Amino acid sequence: MTDGGKVLWTGATLATFAAERDWGLVADGALLVEGGVLRWVGPAAQLPSGLREGIGEVHELGGALVTPGLIDCHTHLVYGGERSAEFELRLQGATYEEIARAGGGIRSTVAATRAASEAALHALAVPRARALMAEGLTTLEVKSGYGLSLEDEAKCLRVARQLADLGLTVRTTCLGAHALPPEFEGRQDAYVDAVCGWLPELKRQGLVDAVDAFCERIAFTPAQTRRVFEAARAAGLPVKLHAEQLSDQGGAALAAGFDALSCDHLEWLSDEGVAAMARAGTVAVLLPGAFYFLRETKLPPVQALRDAGVPIALATDHNPGSSPGLSLLLMLNMACTFFRMTPEEALRGLTVNAARALGLPDRGRLAEGLRADFCIWDAAHPRELAYWFGRNPLRQTVVAGRPRD
Ligand code: DI6
Ligand code: FE
């Protein structure tokens, strides 16, 4: 294909998400792509004649469904080892928090990640990314947080950045404040100081797009989280927060005060938290995989978020402890079954609102001027993507206008 040339994709049902509500469905639709960007989107019969000139390639889609490329805006994809033994312990009655407090949990993944070379971590991360790509992933966020030293965090972030070579956009987030590493036992504040000190260096190395923290009883306090956010602000980096996952710490309101891109998990989010997020325009990232795998019963306040107009995104939260899953389509189904989101809200959560949670206004919808990242599905209506589970109707993914295998 000639890279800059015009390519027409036609004969499709488009789920454009062009408006604030509803699918933005276009029957018998067409997409005109030029230079990796959507040049025109609409009913094929209305393609202006001036734009028809010079089309070098036409793909007839025979009634397939086209959606924006899927975006996983919250993962911990780069790590060593796995935690199936901990899964067994939980089945025998131990809780996630008990395991974490006993030095298992995140800390065991930290040991395995520190012991792994960059090449080994890359070899482990590639099949995970490929599993997500098999269901239409085009943009991936990856957090550090299993290295917990400047050197090991940088190692993981470099591995994450390398995944872009697979044909993805990768955004990286420093989650140094994820857990306390063993060498800082009893010196939590000193560790927070260290994390704050890494941010300018990671930024200088071009390894980080945002900063996250785990604000929780078993992790970092709101006061410590605030210090991390102040350091992020000083380094010119936007923030996100693992907030209100296991208890209400007031983390969402704190993060909103720093104009956070997103607050994630949110099962224990209060009304004040919802209001603060609405005021700041912070996206609520819901993580049904972790909810499911930890057998949580407290639901995130979806109706309150809707009523307040807080945009809701979804993500896999892929990690070895609380969400060892690699299916975006399953997240759609779970968001509907567990959280009672509509299929339209769920898919919006993996496209438009996920893009917003990453601060990427150039994608997430099918609209003129946006990146030509889209998925072609063997489905008649987009709600089918949330309806089936264990069935993958993806036909083809297109990234910046180019078909990807
Ligand atoms: N919340 C989570 O669910 C993951 N991290 C976090 O802050 C769990 C990470 C792990 O258990 O390894
Ligand atoms: Fe997470």
Image: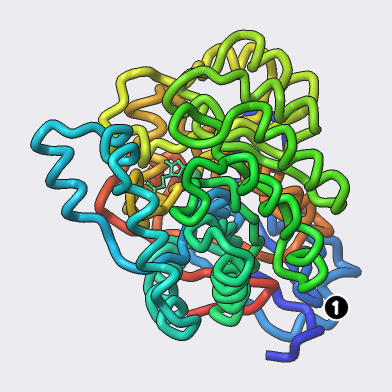
Residue 205 appears in the rendering: yes
Q: Is mark 1 within 8 Å of ligand 2?
A: no
Asked whether 214 or 295 is in front, the reply is 214
Q: Give the left or right position of residue 99, taking residue 66 as reference.
A: left
Please say if 386 is above or below 181: above
Could you say whether the residue bearing mark 1 is in a helix, strand or loop? loop
Residue most toward the bottom? 2
Residue 16 appears in the rendering: no
Residue at the image position 27 percent from the left and 33 percent from the top? 98
Asked whether 14 or 258 is in front, the reply is 258
Residue at the image position 72 percent from the left and 60 percent from the top? 198
Please say if 161 is above or below 391: below
Question: Which amino acid is tagged 1?
Answer: Glu
Residue at the image position 47 percent from the left and 46 percent from the top? 185
Q: Which residue is mark 1?
A: 53
Residue 120 location (% of width, % of height): 41, 82
Q: Residues within 10 Å of mark 1 (few under 14, many from 20)?
A: few
